[in-house]
Amino acid sequence: QVQLQESGPGLVKPSGTLSLTCGVSGGSISSRNWWSWVRQPPGKGLEWIGEIYHSGSTKYNPSLKSRVTISVDKSKNQLSLELSSVTAADTAVYYCARGVTMDPGRFDYWGQGTLVTVSS
Amino acid sequence: QSALTQPASVSGSPGQSITISCTGTSSDVGGYKYVSWYQHHPGKAPKLMIYEVSNRPSGVSNRFSGSKSGNTASLIISRLQAEDEADYYCSSYTSISTLVFGGGTKLTVL
């Protein structure tokens, strides 16, 4: 059973950089899957942030592309998210999810999510 | 990319059927078979209910079904149960190789 667990600071200052990691257990980050980050601001809907393949190939939401970096660390079996120049609008629950290869948008495993608040 | 359009809320009584629509464009919903639906209970991880427009993952009740016509996809829940009360989101692959979600629909079981 694959399990995903997000971790990182729960509070980030405005203009700072949000950094999260997603540890993968019960499976390999090098498997034939894309790994995504999705967020949900309080009271709002889900927003896809971007995804990465273990080869390092990435795809990003155009609205966030200039501020987002997603990476993988095969040695630690985890993926990471960095979002720069954050504002209060980036306050959200952040999820990582495993995508099924050749089936965009089909996420079969999700983390429980972690709340990140942007505030001074 | 703009979020797909879903009704903010729908409601139904136990035993009834409801339909949640998800409207996009020919560059997303209308152009690809990659439409998925997720059930989301507050505080929990989203759960995949439908993928590729109308396919159910193993373990998902056959009361959940999906369809698509043109630029609009639909999630149908039949024989409504109290446990179905949740937020539902559609998602679609897009012409620029990204993913877009719908705004979400709150289902209330009366």
Image: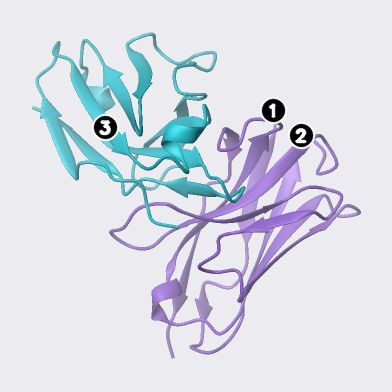
Question: Which chain's residue wears label 2?
Answer: A
Q: Disc 3 to disc 2, how far (Cα)?
A: 36 Å
Q: Is residue A47 left or right of residue B80?
A: right
The kind of secondary structure element at disc 3 is strand
The kind of secondary structure element at disc 1 is loop
* Badge 2: residue crowd in 10 Å (few <14, some 14–19, many ≥20): few
- State the residue in front, A115 or B1: B1
Q: Which mark is residue A26?
A: 2
User: Does residue B88 lie above or below B53 as drawn?
Assistant: below
Q: Earlier in the sequence, mark 2 or mark 1?
A: 1
Question: Which chain's residue wears label 3?
Answer: B
Chain B colour? cyan
Q: Amino acid at mark 2?
A: Gly
User: Does residue B97 lie above or below A101 as drawn?
Assistant: below
The kind of secondary structure element at disc 2 is loop
Q: Disc 1 to disc 3, how far (Cα)?
A: 32 Å
- State the residue in front, B68 or A50: B68
* Badge 3: residue crowd in 10 Å (few <14, some 14–19, many ≥20): many
Q: Indicate the position of residue A33 as horizontal and vertical percent values.
A: 74, 37
Count the numbered circles shown. Answer: 3
Q: Which chain is purple?
A: A
In the picture, the quarter occupied by the C terminus of chain B is top left
Residue tagged 3 = B21
